[in-house]
Amino acid sequence: MFKSWNSFLSFRHKKKQEERYFHDKEVQDFFADVMATARERVELIPKGHQYWRAQLGCDEEPLYDNGQIVDYNAVPYPDKRMKPLADEASEGRINPKGISCLYLSTDEKTAISEVRPLVGSYVTVVQFKTLKNLKVIDCSCGEINPMNITVYDMDKLWKLKTPKPKEATQVVWRWIDLAFSEPTDRNDKTADYVPTQIIAELFKTNGFDGIKYKSLFNNGNNVALYDINSAKQINNDKVIQVTNIDVGFKQIYPTQFGI
């Protein structure tokens, strides 16, 4: 049981603004609470389970007429383009720079949505299957949202009324799930990724194979596997063209909290 509903917020602030690599007693106690409550969030993924992965763009194949190139057909990227390189990863919510992680989605639409394509753009979509039984932490656990928290509230909720004790653990895990779900952006600071990278390494060093978390772009979930060789691509790749995008929005200023 977490000592406070805002335990994750305190941890995140400390790792972004105060102490990056040293973990004091407060942080260590937070880690202990995370692992103690994670026991009910363990999901076993069987060998052969299938997931989806997408990348913006595609390759082109020339179309000939009487020996002359008259057009190009869209074809999927080659297999090597659809899997991260072992030592050339950029910063992510789960992996630090240089340590690769295999990001997958539970369904095709979620995988496509995660790459944030524009209308009219092409996307290469492939499927992966797991090569062994895996054990992951499900940060969402399909749970309800007791305080109607969204990722855009994460820095604005210090003045909210404290939830009941029985809701505190659920709220903390909602924060964790949202932190992993928050989209990455090329303008993000490295420090923005540190808190979730630390939690991801906490799970990894405790023997778990990855993390499952909700997608903010669709109703599906994402799965990040620490070992990029724990799943392989199967031969059903394709190219899709995006025809429409559903846009949701929320007013963030002025806020209902008056902050």
Image (cartoon, rainbow, N blue to C red):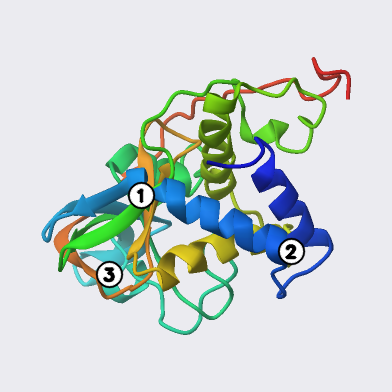
Where residue 71 appears, as percent x and y from the top left, is 33, 58
Callout 1, which amino acid? Arg
Which residue is at the far top?
256
Which residue is at the far bottom?
87
- Residue 153 in which image quadrant: top right
Q: Which residue does the image show at 34% across and 43% down from the upper left?
A: 40
Residue 203 visible in the snapshot: yes
Label 3 to label 2: alpha-carbon separation = 53 Å
Residue 68's label in the rendered image is: 3
Q: Earlier in the sequence, mark 2 or mark 1?
A: 1
Residue 191's label in the rendered image is: 2
Where residue 152 appears, as percent x and y from the top left, is 69, 33
The residue nearer to you, when weighing 178 against 32, is 32
Q: Which residue does the image show at 35% across and 36% down from the upper left?
A: 220
Label 3 to label 1: alpha-carbon separation = 63 Å
Above or below — where is 204 with respect to 178?
A: below
Above or below — where is 154 with respect to 90?
A: above
Q: Which residue is mark 1?
A: 39
